[in-house]
Image (cartoon, coloured by chain):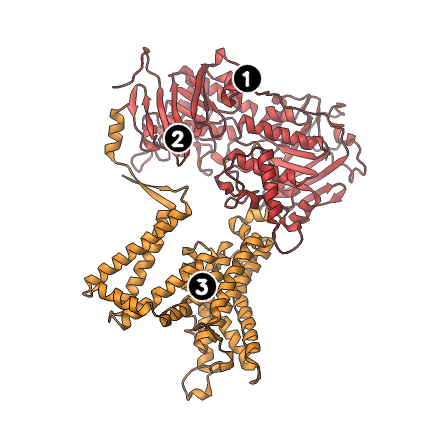
Chain colours: A orange, B red
Amino acid sequence: MLRIARKEDMTGLRAVGVRIAAVLLALLASGLLILAMGYDPREVVRVMWSGMRTLKALASMIRIAIPLAMAALAVSIAFTMKFWNIGAEGQILMGAFAATAISSVLPEGTPGALRILLMALAGLAGGALWALPPALFRAAFRTNETLLTLMFNYIAIRWVEYLRCQLWKDPAAMGFPQIAPIPESAHLPQLLGVHIGWILVLVLAFLQWVFLRRTKKGFEVRVVGESEKTARYAGMTVGRVLLFGVLLSGALAGLTGMVKLNGTAFVLAERLAGGDGFTAIIIAWLSNLSAPVILVVAFLFAAMKQGAGWMEGLAGIPSALADTVQGLILFFALGSEFFIRYRIILESRHRTERKEAHP
Amino acid sequence: MGGPVPSAECPAIEMAGICKSFGHVRANHNVGFSVRSGEIHALLGENGSGKSTLMNILSGIYLPDAGSVAVRGRHVAFRSPRDAIAIGIGMVHQHFKLVESMTAMENIVAGTGRGLRLDRQQARERIRAFSRRFEMGLDPDKRVHDMSVGEKQTVEILKVLYRGADILVLDEPTAVLTPQEIGRLFGILRLMRQEGHSVIFISHKLNEVMSLCDRVTVLRRGETVGTVAVADCTTSRLVEMMVGRVVDLSIDRPRVQSSGLCLSVRNLSVRDEEGIRKLDDVSFDLHHGEILGVAGLAGSGQKELCETIAGLQAAEGGRIAFHGNDILGRSPRDIIRLGISMSFIPEDRLGMGLVAGMDIADNVMLKDYAFRPGLFLDRTAARKKAREIVSRLSIDTPGIFHPVRKLSGGNIQKVILGREIDLNPKLLITAYAVRGLDIHSSYTIYRLLNDQKVKGVAVLYIGEDLDVLLELCDRILVLFNGRVTGIVDARSSTKERIGLMMTGETPRAEGWQVPLPVPPLPASNACPVADRLLSPDSDRTMPAGPDGKGGGPC
């Protein structure tokens, strides 16, 4: 007979062990799957490794990891309050949209640094404003923020599509529905082969940690997440804290959009967010909403994403299979959380009988 | 094999060598526990002594790591509560698990039937038979939401009897009852004893144990201290067994020269979110250096009273003045800043007042973090304070960075009270501060409250245990259905009288007061003599005339 019981005392170290075991098991399962499909897993590993160990590949992984980590930092603030902001995708887009809008009105001769700074501010504002309505509705009418933030994603996507095809269609693109790229002076400068977004991510992770752990506002955010009743009892205005936290979350997501725009994409399009806002949710959860862990997990996700690309390109494995492998890894990683929080007790008949016979 | 019992008759329950550990914590170690048929057996022990673990093993919720359980001489190994009930062991929990909108019968029968059809007539008859046999006076067709707390408990007891239990475990059954209801319950239990049922009675109230039970088993730190017959025992001996040393059981009640009026509540009325009236025309005064007790059945408006004073609940009408200033409608933070500290221990202990997932240090700054300058938390101060509170109240914790959730109930309550006292309040409101606490922790808390009183703090003490209210408080306000049925002098009042007032009876003896719709607010710190007079235009049917009784703290 099987019984499931809550685990009370899982030490941090053992939890890490379980998670590592999960990833290893996932790789094993993927290997079997690849084998079953008629490919040689060893060959796949060799190809992937050769693709991963170069500096160029590393730089590319970091480029992928930057927006993932930033967006995960963003949603984890909201998640700390138990405000389920799954609208990072839309907030990223609206941040990029606001940045593009500001850039388009600035005179051509604006110095690059100033342009980047203004675009960053616009990105923050764009993301925050896009997160505002769901937060207001939740604070005022207790509506479900999950639905609202989700739906706002689609509004943002369609809005950018409309811009691309109609309002902001670039006449220089010769009829191709595309928004004009941002000027080259607005591209983020490179440092050690990657745009400086990586420094920004490290700084933001630190600041986010300081905010939540060391500041009064961050303390309020944490208390509200634990219990709104206790927060009220302690004299906090729950609605105001909620609003503040969500705005911060949205602003960070918006900044992510700006970094994607000025760092890698250079053109606003509805594909700009590319699912990062959703992947960020998984990253934030797997990291237990902890900023330093988010950095690590985001990098691992980037490696996975890149690895899938390599598998397709070099080992000749169809992209569907590569996606399946990605899914397997996720499945195991999420499944391991169950084993961290619960344990399964096996009660054999044998044991009870022995007990009865031995008073 | 079989029951290794030398005596002629097999005991109803024989637990031997029971061991159970949770991680590193040894909850039960080599515990022996034996209950005869036809006896009421008390199980005593402080919080964390292993009572709950032992009873959970007996009712099939936990499997013991080692040891044996025998019921009527036959060894058993329960794998689920279902097994335990099948063999005749029934647990009556402290918190009722009843469906409010259903009738007594529906609650009792739910989950017992085999087919889809329920023979209502037969079920009703069986319940009536039980009710007659044990003089319960229960109407099977009464809906639970129309019942008093005592009746609900009767339903809980009938639930396990109906399932065939003849060994009943009652976990603190008297905690929420009036003295009259307790008397009735004891009557029922004694009848059960006569019929040969076994009752295991868990309580912290020693006088109840002495008056009801035949034998007592005492646990301490997971081990059996011993089993004694009540007849050859005294209360102080039991306490000594529980605590491990001699403890003085009298509660201090220092007389303090009042230094003036602290809180004035006039005609306060409150409705909850559903528009149900929770407080109805409540008026009273509270002075510095006084402990005013609030007695009442659960849900008589205690929570609303606390929350309204703390600014967490809007009032429909009336006034609350603190040092002469109106505080109704002010924000909770403003009220905290004024020096009004409220702590309410809900039934789950954690619902409000503490952040379960945070550590002690974080919880200590919960109330005053905002009053410190700057953007950042003052964690050094909080840590220092947390250490002080831990050592002053001897809180049992691995450290101040230990999550509160993992502390035991008593320690959780000490953290709350320690923090509230540390705020140096002028008015300390504390509701159910000793809920579920053992003797040792309770007395620590009484001592802390008395310290506050001597310092001149006005204390509003909302309690459940009338004995304690009568010993600790200066005056006692009795609530019934959100109305004040009277304010009595605790030094001269009796348990029975308060018990009657708790059920809405109008008191007719002297020593009670009816709050007046007193004109504005007493400007000075004078003794509220007006409060002690009867209102001639009171809408209640009460004998007129002043009670003329002195006493009180003035």
Chain letter behind tag 2: B
- Foreground: disc 3 or disc 2: 3
- Foreground: disc 1 or disc 3: 3
Q: Position of residue A60 (x, y in %)?
A: 38, 71
- Foreground: disc 1 or disc 2: 1
Q: Amino acid type of disc 3?
A: Ala
Q: CA distance from mark 1 to mark 2?
A: 28 Å
Image marks 3 and 2: residues in contact by CB distance under 8 Å: no
Looking at the image, residue B300 sits to the left or right of residue A65; the answer is right
- Residue found at x 75% / y 41%: B323
Q: Amino acid type of disc 2?
A: Asn
Q: Amino acid type of disc 1?
A: Ser
- Find numbered disc 3 in the image and state the secondary structure of the residue it sits on: helix
Q: Is residue A91 visible?
A: no
Label annotation for residue A69: 3
Discs 1 and 3 lie in a common subunit: no
Q: CA distance from mark 3 to mark 2?
A: 46 Å
Residue B179 in which image quadrant: top right
